[in-house]
Image (spheres, grey):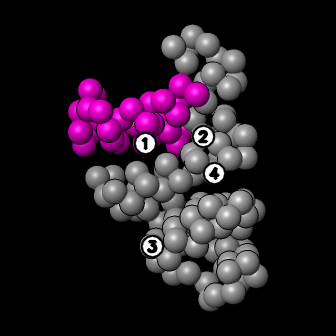
Amino acid sequence: MRILAGFVCALVVGAQEPTSWEELRAKGRTALDNGQFGAAYPLLREALDVAQYLPKTDGRYFTSLRDMAELSFALGRYDEAEPHLRLAVFFREQQVGKEHLSLYPDLEALGYSYYARLMMPEAA
């Protein structure tokens, strides 16, 4: 997967293979923001893979989960966004508590992922 990410990155962005979470995320976000979803996926996926080995309290893990959810939404893959959003909410709740306002955007996105799949009881 790393070789593929480097190959896509070199083709799309014209750079060497990214090596750190920051580089992977920056290049992945640039591709996502420019609508280059095929290029964004391997970069953001690898950034999430890197972040999984960091402490769960590290903001990079939470950020990578949200990035993957956003990419899934952009592709209309709401079922793929759900597990990322669930984990993002879970780990964010551990940091700030279950009733903190900063949870709202992720809870709203999670509800929308249910709504978009006509899972009304879960969306409510």
Q: Are marks 4 and 1 in contact (CB under 8 Å)?
A: no
Q: Are marks 4 and 2 in contact (CB under 8 Å)?
A: no
Q: Are marks 2 and 1 in contact (CB under 8 Å)?
A: no
Question: Which tag, 2 or 1, sits closer to the chain's start?
Answer: 2
Badge 1 amino acid: Ala
Q: Are marks 3 and 2 in contact (CB under 8 Å)?
A: no
Badge 2 amino acid: Ala
From this viewpoint, which residue is outermost toward the front?
A: 34
Left or right of 95 on screen, residue 87: right
Q: Which residues are magenta?
A: 83-112
Which residue is the site of mark 1? Answer: 88
Which residue is the site of mark 3? Answer: 22
Position of residue 85 measured from the top left corner of the image (x, y, whole percent)? 50, 39
Left or right of 124 on screen, residue 5: right
Q: Residue at x 62, y 61 (%)?
A: 33
Q: Is residue 3 visible?
A: no
Position of residue 110 measured from the top left corner of the image (x, y, whole percent)? 52, 31
Q: Residue at x 66, y 34 (%)?
A: 79
> How many angstroms separate mark 3 from mark 4 (CA)?
17 Å
From this viewpoint, which residue is outermost toward the top?
A: 121
Left or right of 3 on screen, residue 86: left
Badge 4 amino acid: Leu
Mark 4 residue element: helix
Question: Which tag, 4 or 2, sits closer to the chain's start?
Answer: 4
The answer to if 8 sits in the magenta stretch is no
Position of residue 37 measured from the top left corner of the image (x, y, whole percent)? 72, 59
> How many angstroms separate mark 4 from mark 2 (CA)?
8 Å
Badge 3 amino acid: Glu
Question: Which tag, 3 or 4, sits closer to the chain's start?
Answer: 3
Which residue is the site of mark 4? Answer: 71
